[in-house]
Amino acid sequence: MKTKVLDKTQFEVAADILKHGGVVGIPTETVYGLAADALNGKAVEKIFKAKGRPMDNPLIVHVADFSDIEKFNLVSEVPENAKILAKAFWPGPLTIIMKRTDVIPPEVSAGLDTVAIRFPSHPIAQEIIRVAGTPLAAPSANLSGSPSPTTARHVLNDMDGKIDAVLDGGSCEVGVESTVITLAADVPRVLRPGGITVEELRDVLGEVEVDDAVIHQLAEGVTAASPGMKYKHYAPKANVLLLKGSDDAYISYVNSHSDDDVCALCCDEDLLLLKTKTVSLGRRNDYLTHARHLFDCLRRIDENKTIRTVYSRLPDVEGVGLAVYNRLIRAAGFEVIDLEKI
Ligand code: AMP
Ligand code: MG
């Protein structure tokens, strides 16, 4: 299959492909999504095939307005908390899980009785959904397990020849995927941290729990509330190791392990102190910038084919830092070296 590259004026071409059951890489404010008609199980199946995604990992359904949820009869009931969240954060990087109806094909919900819904703020994504006239299922447009794509070039690197088209809308503003919150539990619970922080959610909802799987590796045999959380994910081909400790301890550990095949994923302030290859996420404590750059940094590390080991600092868990932590700890397969204990 030849993958067409569309420019940002060609959203109607993208929408037309989607209407006819095709698959298109589309820009959103979080990461690029691999979109298909969410109400067409056959079209959705193509997403799983292109990504090599396990069929038990459900997809997020993207709408172009809050009213689309009722218009397309996607959920059995819109909880009061969903209205509060939508008012505060939609359109934007927040996905809300609610009880689904039978309109949702089994491929989308992966056998669960719930559906995850998001109203993205990216104007091109909104236009494509509106013109396609149907909600779009759209996971991140990377090969399953790889870092998510934040540019059309990243999408092509993974998907060229596997999908109908990609629409180039430039770089993604947020850079990490949406926050996923479920309202199907007794207390609202964050299953995946992202662009909207836990602190912001607590400000509008009061009590909000954070699922254990956000920070910790799931114990053997425990069922993941969010199936995507159980996989090693976001990983470059190089081996990522997370270092826990002070700034000085990080610098001295990396410098004493410096080699031709080593790279430090670091902050701007470290650049002059490190005696090895470096890729910077941005200024220290600027978590929004770290999130925006994270996946591009991981992909750039892989483009340098000699790099086998990446030393990154364990991120802080405040604000959007929690989303960066959640992605990096999975990229590292939960491998953390405590510098105070060596
Ligand atoms: P991605 O599509 O790559 O952004 O990943 C979507 C994430 O949302 C994955 O971690 C899924 O497991 C999770 N997800 C989607 N739908 C549901 C659902 N109905 N219940 C729980 N988690 C979900
Ligand atoms: Mg993904």
Image (tube, rainbow, N blue to C red):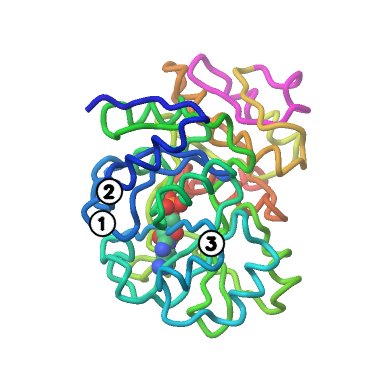
Crowding at dot 3, Cα within 10 Å, few <14 / some 14-19 / many 20+, comes out as many
Q: Measure how far apart labels 3 and 1 are at the Cα level.
A: 20 Å
Is residue 230 in the magenta section?
A: no
Task: Name the residue carrying label 1.
Answer: 55
- Up the image or down, 5 lies above or below 246; here it is above
Q: Secondary structure at mark 2?
A: helix
Residue 318 in picture, x, y percent from top left: 72, 55
Residue 94 at x, y percent in the picture: 58, 59
Q: Earlier in the sequence, mark 3 or mark 1?
A: 1
Q: Nearer the viewer, residue 337 or 145?
A: 145
Residue type at mark 1 is Met
Report the residue that reaches farthest toward the bottom: 186
C-alpha separation, residue under disc 2 versus residue under disc 3: 20 Å
Circles 1 and 2 in contact, beta carbons < 8 Å: yes
Ligand 1 within 8 A of label 3's CB? yes
In this rendering, position of residue 76 left or right of residue 208: left
SS for tag 3? strand
Which residue is the site of mark 3?
Answer: 95
> Observer-nearest residue: 275 or 230?
230
Q: Is mark 1 within 8 Å of ligand 1?
A: no
Q: Which mark is residue 127?
A: none
